Amino acid sequence: MKKIAVVQLNRLGDIIQTLNSLQGIEEKHDVEVTLIGRKSFLAPLETIAKQFVSKVSFVDLENLAENDLGSMLSNVNDYIASLNEVKFDLVINLTFDKTSSYLTKLINAPHKVGITRNTQNQVVVNGQWSQYVYSNIMGSDYSCFNLVDIFKNIIGMEGDPPTADFNRESNKIFIHPFASDEKKQWQTSKWVEVIYSLKKKHKDAIIYIVGSKQDTPKVELILSSPILSAYKDDIQVWVGNKSIVELNTEIQDAKLFIGNDSMVSHLAALYRVPTLVVSLGPVRPFETTPYLEGALSVAANIDCFPCAIDKKCDLLPCHNKISHEAVSHLASSIYENNTIDANSLESKLPQTLLNTVTINRLNNTNDGLLPEDLLASATNFDDTIRRIYRIVWSFYLQGKEPKLQTPYINANLAQSFANTLSGLNHLYELYNFAIKFANRIVEEEGSTNIDVKSIQESVHKLNEIDQLLMKTKNTFAEVSPIVDYFHVAKSNIDGNNIFEISRNTLVLFYEAANITAAMFDLCSKIISPYTQETEVKGTAHDI
Amino acid sequence: MSKLSDEIQLAIEELNTKLAEGKELNDNDMGVLFLTSLLEDQTE
């Protein structure tokens, strides 16, 4: 039996998403998986983790701590030695941070996926999907895959995503109205309204409010609301008084989960509990909506959403734009197992409330799960370009064509996309120059008298092209996913000499040019209704 | 803690010198870097 180490040093939510991606791996592939995580995050989830993998291993800094470096290093070496006794065949690092890269380097295995280090202490990113994450998730605004789909692709897991079980008989509604970051947490007053509305409409429902000990003041605020006084007997408060294991047991047969983007939402999704998340602040619905076909997310239809994690915001417009009426209606519809689509929403909610929100439902698009904009309201540039990137990356990375309609855009967006075409055109030209100079180096290999000067000139030109690619990316931010991906891929290219490296780089430049051309074609297609009527400035000549 | 910090600083400097001399890092060196990174995470 092959042995696999999976490194996930991130927080609870990431661990649960990792477990979701590992579902069935041991039975399907006859492997034994050891999940490695920080003790502070993985230990509370140990019981749950062992439903999915055979073994867990804790990175425990407290255990390593000593007064002097020599003793600490001795403890580190002992821990690594204990891991290496397993004799792993494969290490998969799903963490993408510095610490995990060193740990992955230290674990012995013939195959490694994800980030690690070489003996010169340089970052090495193994695997196309890992290179995609390293270039497109860490710091890019145009990520277009759910994190669980990304993990599944890194691991090599196939199979349809789970579907929400809307037909289950249950009267339990779990609500997690808290979040670690204030920007991700909807106002308490809005949660009070949602709970009131649900209880008023569904007398039989039992509401479970869940949270950690530090959420106690907030739950007291919710419960002190006079409008909830009549329903207190039907509200179970699981805030700081239940373990994650108890929550895990009880949430499995819930009828509905509602909450902010958090670990609990991912836990609910593990058991196919119909899920509704209120996505706020830096939450990226494309990436972190709980992995469940049919899961809903509500977000503000506003240009600044999602924002950067470190961006300060006092007014929180993305909180205010989401009405409690919209969330209550969606929750109630799930509870009653009613159809949720544009018609039903428009017939039940005033247009003024719908205009300010984007309601997404995760759909299976054949290449994973992708948010479907139920109101077709997301006429913002970033969401539209994410959908176009989804088509291109799915084809390139998976060889799959997502079941996805070409997005519809309005006239204002058409002008923005015309600008994008200019950026793509620059990019295409640069990659073609790169092909030309990489080709020159490759051709020298076959000649009887190798022209070193010509090779040096070509290398110099390729460096210049690298700089121009960075400039293009800075001018046209929306082309950065392509530039960044191929920059990372090129940095990790195999080869023992300049000719091998150039041959492999040449292939990458061809792929970069092809992807750029595909993006150009798709962007041209979506603005075509407008280019026929009016001249859209900036459209580049056909590629 | 300051003694430990000094020891870590010294160890990192030695690794940087080693890299500057074109030498390769071994598992013990990687252990130092792993530990240092873990300690950094804790203080963040």
Image: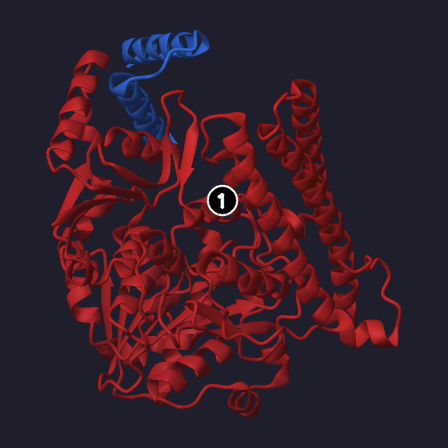
Chain colours: A red, B blue
Q: Few, some or many C-alpha atoms within 10 Å of disc 1 (few <14, some 14-19, many ≥20)?
A: few
Query: On screen, A305 above or below A469?
Result: below
Quarter holding the C terminus of chain A is: bottom right
Residue A164's quadrant in the figure?
bottom left
Q: In screen coordinates, is A421 left or right of A278?
A: right
Q: Which residue is situated farthest in the right direction here? A: A535
The image shows residue A135 at horizontal and vertical percentages of: 51, 44
Q: Which residue is situated farthest in the front direction here? A: A448
Q: In screen coordinates, is A79 left or right of A210?
A: left
Q: In screen coordinates, is A239 left or right of A538?
A: left
Query: On screen, A303 above or below A117?
Result: below
**Circle 1: element type:** loop
> Residue drawn at (56%, 33%), measured in percent from left and top?
A502
The image shows residue A403 at horizontal and vertical percentages of: 50, 75
> Residue drawn at (22%, 32%), measured in percent from left and top?
A108
The number of discs equals 1
> Residue drawn at (30%, 81%), measured in percent from left and top?
A230
Query: On screen, A515 above or below A258?
Result: above
Front one among B35 and A537: A537
**Label 1 amino acid?**
Met
Residue A201's quadrant in the figure?
bottom left
**Residue A157 appears in the picture as rendered:** yes
Chain of the residue on which disc 1 is drawn = A
Q: Which residue is mark 1?
A: A138
The image shows residue B37 at horizontal and vertical percentages of: 34, 27
The image shows residue A240 at horizontal and vertical percentages of: 22, 55
**Residue A280 appears in the picture as rendered:** no
Query: On screen, A325 above or below A23?
Result: below
> Residue drawn at (49%, 58%), measured in percent from left and top?
A284
